[in-house]
Amino acid sequence: MKQFFRFLATVLCAFLISLVPFYGVCSYVWLGLPAYYREGYHKGLVKQYRALKRSDETQPKIVAIGDSSMAYGVDSAQLSSLTGMPCYTLGMHGGMGMAYIFELLEPFIHEGDLIVYPCNPYGAIYYGVDLILMSIEKEPDLYFDFVLRHPFLALSRLKDRCFVKCKGLAMNTPYETTDEFYGKDSFDENGNFTVERGDGYWDYFEECEHIEYSPKIYGDTMILHLNAFDSLCKERGATLLLTSPAMYRGVVDNDEASIEAFEGWVRDTFTAPLISDWDEHFYEKEYFFNYVAHCNSAGMKRYTDSLAEDINSYMEEK
């Protein structure tokens, strides 16, 4: 039996030692070679992160976090003007997973901060490694922070992602962004989405999957993580506030009674306060652009106005 365990220990040590050159080569590809994913929308997350790093930790701030529905829906400059507090956004794509957003935000949570989360059920708690790696290419601090925190998660996708990058660079085939409205330059230096978006692809909306809000679309893991994140905010003297995301009314299958029941469940289940009625942000399609949860410019203004009103009301009642 001792020989067996000695053999296992030898195999494990050999495996761990082999990871050193593997991570060395991958790190050189990801950080040392020319950027390949430099134009993608995911780079907006880096801009948001850098803006938070520049923030004054002694001055209470508002940080709106979430996925693409938040990135498309919250104008941080407008929100700052309406609330009188410096405002930031952090969040880019639901595929990155909210666990990573919570992790990025943690060092910047300070006394008096308000963290606002449009609690979208699509924003699952996990790590979307491919999208995360694409966003932190040529960003040494973010890269090593993620790899050292999650070495085996990085291991699962880093090799394949490096291969794609090397192939693209060798063949001189640039990485294609999603569309002209959703690339790195769509975001200003603070990571705020600034491209003017008018009439959207509204015919496409009728083909989108419908949603029915109910407790079953929020898993136990998300509930535990969100309540744990709320506890962390309270420990730091900050406040986590929940609200509903903007959503095209035509894809919501709930009736009035089921929405009221769901809203009651949210208030009873999550420890952070819900500062809006859940159906407050169900809008007509004229307020959306290329997806049923992606606001156009008019929708962003309306959603940000509503969010500011809810935040101000909460602060007045506090």
Image: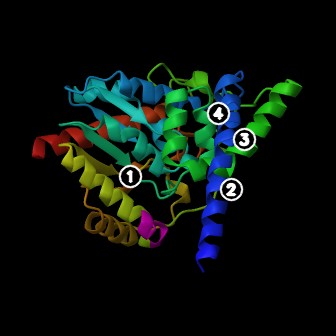
174 w.r.t. 220: above or below: above
The mark that comes first in sequence, 1 or 2, is 2
Disc 1 to disc 2, C-alpha distance: 23 Å
The mark that comes first in sequence, 3 or 2, is 3
Q: Residue 33 in the image: state x and y as whole percent.
A: 71, 23
Q: Is residue 256 left or right of residue 85?
A: right
CB-based contact (under 8 Å), mark 3 and mark 1: no
The mark that comes first in sequence, 4 or 3, is 4
Disc 2 secondary structure class? loop
Image quadrant in which you'd find residue 288: top right
Instruction: Please give the residue where the numbered disc 3 appears in the rendered image.
Output: 161
104 w.r.t. 1: above or below: above
Q: Is residue 275 visible?
A: no
Instruction: Please give the residue where the numbered disc 1 appears in the rendered image.
Output: 244
Q: Residue at x 27, y 48 (%)?
A: 240
Residue at the right extreme, as displayed: 171
Residue 27's label in the rendered image is 4
The mark that comes first in sequence, 2 or 4, is 4
Instruction: Please give the residue where the numbered disc 2 appears in the rendered image.
Output: 207
The verdict on residue 167 being magenta is no
